[in-house]
Amino acid sequence: MLRRGNSDNSDGDDSKSVESPATDQTAPAVGKGRPTPKRREAEARRRGPVAPPPMTSKEARERRKANRGSKDDRKKAAAERRAASAERRERMLAGEDKYLLPRDKGPVRAFARDLVDARRNLVGLFMPLALLLIFALFLSPAVQAFVTLAMFVMMLFMVIEGIFIGRQINNRVRERFPDTTDGGFRLGWYAFVRASQLRKMRAPKPRVERGAAV
């Protein structure tokens, strides 16, 4: 009886031991147990450990000096930046669309500039008259009154001419670019501002001579 009982128990143990692999096979796979590292953390690991902060002001100055490089390197970098800036400005003044400000980009704005630059504008006297008014403030009251009156008359004519320029340029732009959405008050104001500037101070520089057919 004891032997049979032992054999039964052994059979039961065998059956349990046989069933355990099946149980292990049906168990779900265990994940890696940690969140996926962020891109910033992965890049930090690739770059290596971060240097500890400086302990003294002298160490901080030495570290800044080392990061700046030598004096010759700094002079060379500054010269390269100045050359690149000068080149960008030259190309902007030449009218290259890539280097223009957003307000000056596009064929419509280039055409409007050519129309303004090809004509003589009374509005172009605005800046000289403004300087004349400033100098008149130091003269006698009678001269100040005369200059102020003349300024008001000239400004009235300038406003009238500015409205005329805006309408004329809008009409020409609609003829040349019928599908454009750039027009109206914004384009007229753009032309008025350019016309009020001295010719040598306009940016981009004029591409056409006065009186040229555009």
Image (spheres, rainbow, N blue to C red):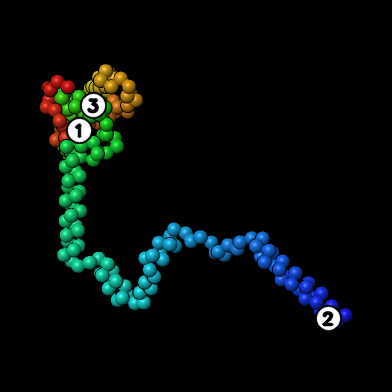
Q: Mark 3 points at which residue?
A: 112
Towards the viewer: 78 or 27: 27
Task: Give the residue drawn at x 15%, y 25%.
Answer: 118
Q: Residue 3 carries which label?
A: 2
How far separated are the C-alphas under marks 3 and 1? Answer: 15 Å
**The quadrant where residue 170 appears:** top left
> Is the N terminus in the top left, top right, bottom left or bottom right quadrant?
bottom right
Q: Nearer the viewer, mark 3 or mark 1?
A: 3
* Residue 79 on image: x %, y %: 16, 56
Task: Give the residue drawn at x 19%, y 35%.
Answer: 95
Q: Mark 2, residues whose alpha carbon is within 10 Å: few (<14), some, or many (≥20)?
A: few
Amino acid type, callout 1: Gln
Q: Which mark is residue 197?
A: 1
Dot 3 or dot 1: first in sequence order is 3
Helix, strand or loop for disc 2: helix
* Residue 88 on image: x %, y %: 20, 44
Task: Give the residue drawn at x 32%, y 22%.
Answer: 179
Helix, strand or loop for disc 3: helix
**The quadrant where residue 192 appears:** top left
Towards the viewer: 154 or 181: 181
Amino acid type, callout 2: Arg
**The quadrant where residue 167 appears:** top left
Dot 2 or dot 3: first in sequence order is 2
Q: Which residue lies furthest to the right in this view?
A: 1
Q: In this view, does 169 lie above or below 205?
A: above
* Residue 41 on image: x %, y %: 44, 62
Helix, strand or loop for disc 1: loop
Q: Residue furthest bottom?
A: 2
88 relative position to 54: left or right: left
Disc tally is 3
